[in-house]
Structures are given as structure tokens and as C-alpha cells.
Amino acid sequence: MIRINLLPVRAAKKKESVLQQLAIFGIGFGLVLAVVLIMFFVRLGQISGAKKDITAANAKISELKAKIGKLDEIKKLKDEVKKKLDVLAELRKNKAGPAKRLATLSDSAPDQLWLESYKESGDTIKIAGLAMNEELIAQFIRALESSTDYERVELVVSEQKDLGGTKLKRFELTSALERTKPPESAPATPVAKK
């Protein structure tokens, strides 16, 4: 009988099988490595794009902050101008106010009534004077109350005073300034539709 030694064929097949497995492993490893590298570079590109977006957003934020700063300055200037205009309007209003009140006071004072002092502090007015009798004081109070410059006129003190042998009535009054109401705005008239 003839004997054939199959061991070298088996060893060759085994060697070939190992080589095939190594080749498959190498190809698989190469494919996995290629996929990982592709994913790495894609992510790297995304990170770079995100960094560019962040830089652009920060630049836009800085630009907007500068504009907001300018707007805040403009608002401050506007408020300052408004305050100055309000002060000017108040000064214009008060410019004529005291002169008009003093003229009203002079016109309201009857004969034989003399004013000694007139003081304004805020919205309160204090008036002191002398009169021949109580009726003149009452007449003076009624005249002041009917004026448009004085409201809530009250008699604080009324006492008799001897001045050079003549008996006079000394009086003190307090009053509040009449505050004029701002003019009401007229309602807007509707526009006819065409």
C-alpha cells in the first residue's frame, strides 16, 4: 500500500487559512480605522465650524453692546433734555405766578386793611396784616377764596392790637396755592374712510 503524507498539505492549508484570517483581520482593521479617521475629521470640521460661529457670534455681541451703549447714552441725553425742558416750563409758569398772586392780593385787600407780611413756602402762603375791624378781615378772606390763585384760606390768628392809641385787629392767614390742572387733550376725531 502506498502511503501519502498529507501533513504538508494540511500544514499548507492551515498556513493559507491563517493568512486569509490575517488578511481579513487586516482589511477589517483598516476599514474600522478608516471609518474612525473619517468620523474624527468630520467632527474636527464640525468643531472648527462651531468655533467660527462662536467667534462670529461674539463679534456680533460686541457690536450690539456698542450700539446698546450708544442707545443708553442717547436715552440719558434725552432724559436730561426732558428734565431741563420741564425746569424751563416750571420757571416760565412760576415767572408770572408770584406777580399775578401779588396783584390779586392787592386787588382783594379792602380799604383800611394793611398787609404786613407775605411768605410763600412750597404750596403754602402765610399772610399777616392789620385791619380796622373783623368785617374787613372776613371780606378779605372771601375775596381771596373767590380768586383763582388762592384756595383753602384760613384765619389762624385774630387779636386786638393797640397802635398809637388806635385799636386795630392783627390777623394771620394761611392759604394753599391754587394748582392749575394740565389741559385735557381733546379726543381724536375719527378719519373718514374712503
Image (cartoon, rainbow, N blue to C red):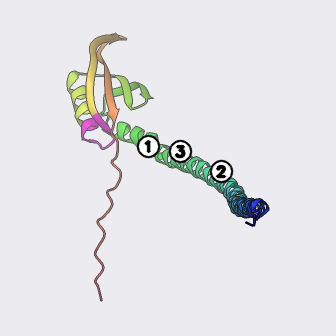
- Mark 2, residue position: 69
Does residue 40 appear to the left or right of 87 in the view shown?
right
Mark 2 vs mark 1: which is more N-terminal? Answer: 2
Tag 2: amino acid: Gly
CB atoms of marks 3 and 1 within 8 Å: no
- Mark 3, residue position: 87
Residue 97: numbered disc? 1
State which region is magenta: 143-151
Mark 2 vs mark 3: which is more N-terminal? Answer: 2
Q: Is residue 3 above or below residue 146?
A: below
Magenta segment includes 10: no
Task: Give the foreground label among 2 and 1.
Answer: 2
Q: Is residue 12 above or below residue 145?
A: below
In percent of width and height, residue 21 lies at: 71, 60
Residue in front for this viewpoint, 101 or 28: 28
| Residue drawn at x 68%, y 55% as measured from the top left | 54
